[in-house]
Amino acid sequence: MKILKNLFESNRKWAEKIKRADPDFFNKLSQQQRPEYLWIGCSDSRVPANEIVDMLPGEIFVHRNIANVVIHTDLNCLSVIQYAVDVLKVKHIIVCGHYGCGGVQAAMENKAHGLIDNWLQNIKDVYRHHQQKIDAVQSETERFNLLCELNVIEQVANVCHTTIVQNAWRSGQKLAVHGWIYSIHDGILKDLNVCSTGIDDISSIHRIT
Ligand code: CO
């Protein structure tokens, strides 16, 4: 007896539905993937990359972790970025956060959450970098929303600072890095207007020549 039988049943129905719309769909996809986008998002079950932008399998390369954090020693995230940029030649990297992010909320607290506290330190760093601006906001919800946004902006910068992205830009590869935020209340994406498209968009200390 199969465990989680309902999921296997759903899977068969889903595959049939796709094949009805395009009988050659899986055959084409099995040959190769050519996504134009790399999505770096939160693991939160309410923020599924493909669904939000209504894209089919094959259209978006995805990396997700708690609170969409990009750290320079995270071999997992860096490997995803390198493969997406160097091999798949994606044209866009989208860092997408979301309001109401549990990871960001936990980082704003002082209580212990276990191992994850080490991960959340990265978001506490974002808070510390922008503490004056955040603490000046009266409403607790708005402070939380602001840190969710600032975290995305910081992670966009981290993506741009990688040698992977800098090398791609230097070699003339067309690559834009975007910062977006998603509202789980209405399903709407907002562009945070921090799009970076070249070395000139990053601070001089991070430029590697
Ligand atoms: Co989240």
Image (cartoon, grey):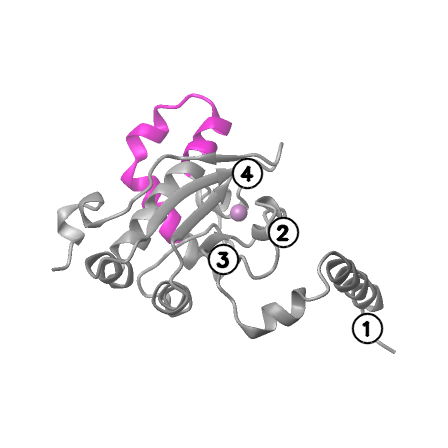
Give SS at disc 3.
Answer: strand
Assess mark 3: CB under 8 A from ligand 1?
A: no
Which image quarter is the C terminus in?
A: bottom left
Side of 169 relative to 23 (left or right)? left
Q: Nearer the viewer, residue 112 or 29?
A: 29
Q: Main secondary structure of the magenta part?
A: helix
Give SS at disc 4.
Answer: loop
Q: Position of residue 95 (x, y in %)?
A: 42, 48
Residue at mark 3 to residue at mark 4: CA–CA distance: 15 Å
* Amino acid on which the number 1 mark rests in the picture: Ile
* Amino acid on which the number 3 mark rests in the picture: Asn
Residue at mark 4 to residue at mark 1: CA–CA distance: 33 Å
Residue position for label 3: 65
Quarter of the image where one finds residue 131: top left
Side of 166 relative to 19 (left or right)? left
Residue position for label 1: 3
* Amino acid on which the number 2 mark rests in the picture: Ser
Q: Position of residue 138 (x, y in %)?
A: 42, 21
Binning the other alpha carbons within 10 Å of mark 3 as few (below 14), some (14 to 19) or many (20 upward) gives some
Residue position for label 4: 100
Residue at mark 1 to residue at mark 3: CA–CA distance: 27 Å
Give SS at disc 2.
Answer: loop
Binning the other alpha carbons within 10 Å of mark 4 as few (below 14), some (14 to 19) or many (20 upward) gives some
Residue at mark 2 to residue at mark 1: CA–CA distance: 21 Å
Q: Position of residue 94 (x, y in %)?
A: 43, 49
First reached walking from the N terminus: tag 2 or tag 1: 1
First reached walking from the N terminus: tag 1 or tag 3: 1
Residue position for label 2: 45
Image: magenta residue range: 121-147
